[in-house]
Image: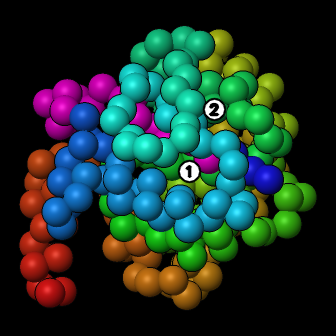
Amino acid sequence: MPSAAILAGGRASRFGGRDKGALIVNGRTILDRQLSALDGLADLIDDLLIVGAPRPVGSRDCRFVSDRLAGRGPLGGLEAALLSARHEHVLLLACDMPFLTGPFLRFLLEMPPDVDVSVPRTKRGYHPLCAVYSRRCLAAVTRRLNEDRLKLSGLLDEVRVRVVEQDGIEQFGRSGRLLANVNTPAELDDLEALLGHEV
């Protein structure tokens, strides 16, 4: 079985330092929306990590873990997840992606475990903050952290990658919505406007 890890400890400097997982999208926090998607994968996932400061998660059974090196962004969070996970593979999610669905996450998790990373790619590029990582990545992750090379996209050049292309993603919905994230207040406004048009 894989583990799942939600990166919830970012500084969100473009969002005034607010906790992006606590942002409300269509009446629910982003974190709650993600946890609900993961609830549907209980047959696959029995180990849930929240990487960063503890967050209210209701009655859900999860573990809170901290980065080994503070202030190193998502790469530091990935290292913490790989070090702490009970299983060989980790589904890594950023806490600012409100429209991830259980069926899409199951699709990622059920890919053959013969690579180091399974990562979606759209016209906007790779989405390494919604991907499945093997513990085999750990040496490369730690080396890059120690060398202060922090871009997750750079890690993909050093490990074996399975790319999930846009046509595979869009079996589960429009990729621009499914993999949307909220980095700024303007992006949150855009998402709310999109939801208003879809009602």
Marks 2, 1: nearer the viewer: 2
Q: At 56% across and 50% down in the image, what residue appears?
A: 128
Q: What residue type is labelled 1?
A: Pro
Magenta span of residues: 4-18
Q: In which quarter of the image is residue 174?
A: bottom left
Quadrant where the image shows the C terminus: bottom left
Q: Where is residue 34 in the image (x, y as percent from the top left)?
A: 42, 56
Could you tell me if residue 153 is visible in this image?
A: no
Count every numbered label the image shows and give the total.
2
Q: Quadrant of residue 15?
A: top left
User: Is 117 a magenta residue?
Assistant: no
The correct choice, above or below, for 169 with respect to 59 in the image is below
What residue does disc 1 label?
128
Q: At 77% across and 35% down in the image, what residue appears?
A: 86
Mark 2 lies on a secondary structure that is helix
The correct choice, above or below, for 191 with respect to 32 in the image is below
What residue does disc 2 label?
81
Q: In which quarter of the image is residue 36?
A: bottom left
